[in-house]
Image (spheres, grey):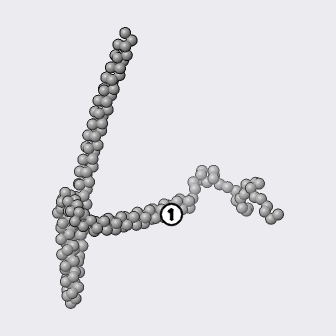
C-alpha cells in the first residue's frame, strides 16, 4: 500500500507541474501579445510624427528655396549673372528637396533612408557621426544654459527680502569677527 500512495503523490505533483507550465505558457503568450500591441502603437505614433515633422520641415525648406530665388533675382538685377545662376540652381535644389519632404509619406521616407544607407554605408556613418556630434553639442549647450538660468534664479531668490515671520526666525545678531565654534580654533603660532 505505501507504494501506491507514493505513485499517487508523484502523479499529483506531475499534474500540478504540467498545470503550472500551461499557466506560465499562457501568461508568456499574453505578455508577448501586449508587447506586440504596444510596439505596434508606438511604431504607428512614430510614423505619424514623422509625417507631420517632415511636412513642416518641407514647408520651411521650400520657403528657404523661395528666399534663395528672390536673392538670385536681386543678384540678377544688380548685374551679377554668375552669382544669380548659382543662387537659381541652389534654389531649385532646395525647393525640390522641400517638395520631397512635404509630399513624402513616412513609408517612402524610411525606405529611401534605408536604401541610401545600404548603397552608401560610409556616407550614412559619416552623417550619423555628424548628427551625433551636433546633438551632443546641443545637449551640452542647453545644459549649460539651464544651469546658468537655475543659478541666476537661486541668486535672485536669495536677494529677495524675507517675510517678517521668516526674518524674525532666521535673524542673527551682528557678527564682530569670524565665526568659529568654541575650541575649534587652535593657536598654531607655538
Q: Residue at x 35, y 22 (%)?
A: 13
Question: Can you say whether 46 is above or below 9 in the image?
Answer: below
Quadrant for the C terminus, please.
Answer: bottom right
**Furthest-bottom residue in view?**
79
Q: Residue at x 58, y 56 (%)?
A: 162
The front one of 118 and 86 is 118
So how many labels did they put on this image? Answer: 1
For mark 1, does the 10 Å Cα neighbourhood hold few (<14), some (14 to 19), or many (20 or more) residues?
Answer: few
Question: Dot 1 lies on which element?
Answer: helix
Residue 149 visible within the image:
no
Counting from the top left corner in percent of width and height, residue 110 is at 22, 59
Counting from the top left corner in percent of width and height, residue 152 is at 50, 63
The front one of 49 and 119 is 119
Q: Which residue is mark 1?
A: 152
Counting from the top left corner in percent of width and height, residue 132 is at 36, 64
- Left or right of 67 in this view: 176: right
The front one of 107 and 171 is 107
- Left or right of 98 in this view: 144: right
**Furthest-right residue in view?**
190
- Left or right of 151 in this view: 83: left
Q: Residue at x 79, y 61 (%)?
A: 187
Q: Would you identify the image quadrant in which residue 4 lies?
A: top left
The front one of 188 and 80 is 188
Counting from the top left corner in percent of width and height, residue 158 is at 56, 59
Residue 85 visible within the image:
yes
Q: Would you identify the image quadrant in which residue 155 lies?
A: bottom right
Quadrant for the N terminus, please.
Answer: top left
Amino acid at each position: 500500500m505505501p507504494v501506491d500512495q507514493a505513485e499517487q503523490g508523484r502523479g499529483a505533483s506531475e499534474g500540478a507541474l504540467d498545470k503550472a507550465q500551461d499557466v506560465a505558457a499562457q501568461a508568456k503568450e499574453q505578455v508577448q501579445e501586449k508587447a506586440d500591441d504596444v510596439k505596434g502603437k508606438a511604431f504607428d505614433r512614430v510614423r505619424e510624427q514623422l509625417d507631420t515633422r517632415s511636412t513642416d520641415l518641407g514647408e520651411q525648406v521650400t520657403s528657404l528655396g523661395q528666399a534663395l530665388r528672390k536673392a538670385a533675382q536681386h543678384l540678377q538685377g544688380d548685374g551679377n549673372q554668375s552669382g544669380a545662376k548659382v543662387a537659381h540652381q541652389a534654389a531649385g535644389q532646395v525647393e525640390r528637396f522641400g517638395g520631397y519632404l512635404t509630399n513624402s509619406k513616412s513609408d517612402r521616407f524610411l525606405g529611401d533612408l534605408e536604401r541610401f544607407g545600404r548603397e552608401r554605408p560610409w556616407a550614412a556613418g559619416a552623417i550619423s557621426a555628424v548628427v551625433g556630434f551636433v546633438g551632443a553639442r546641443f545637449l551640452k549647450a542647453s545644459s549649460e544654459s539651464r544651469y546658468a538660468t537655475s543659478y541666476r534664479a537661486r541668486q535672485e531668490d536669495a536677494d529677495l527680502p524675507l517675510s517678517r515671520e521668516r526674518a524674525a526666525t532666521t535673524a542673527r545678531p551682528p557678527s564682530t569677527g569670524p565665526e568659529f565654534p568654541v575650541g575649534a580654533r587652535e593657536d598654531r603660532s607655538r
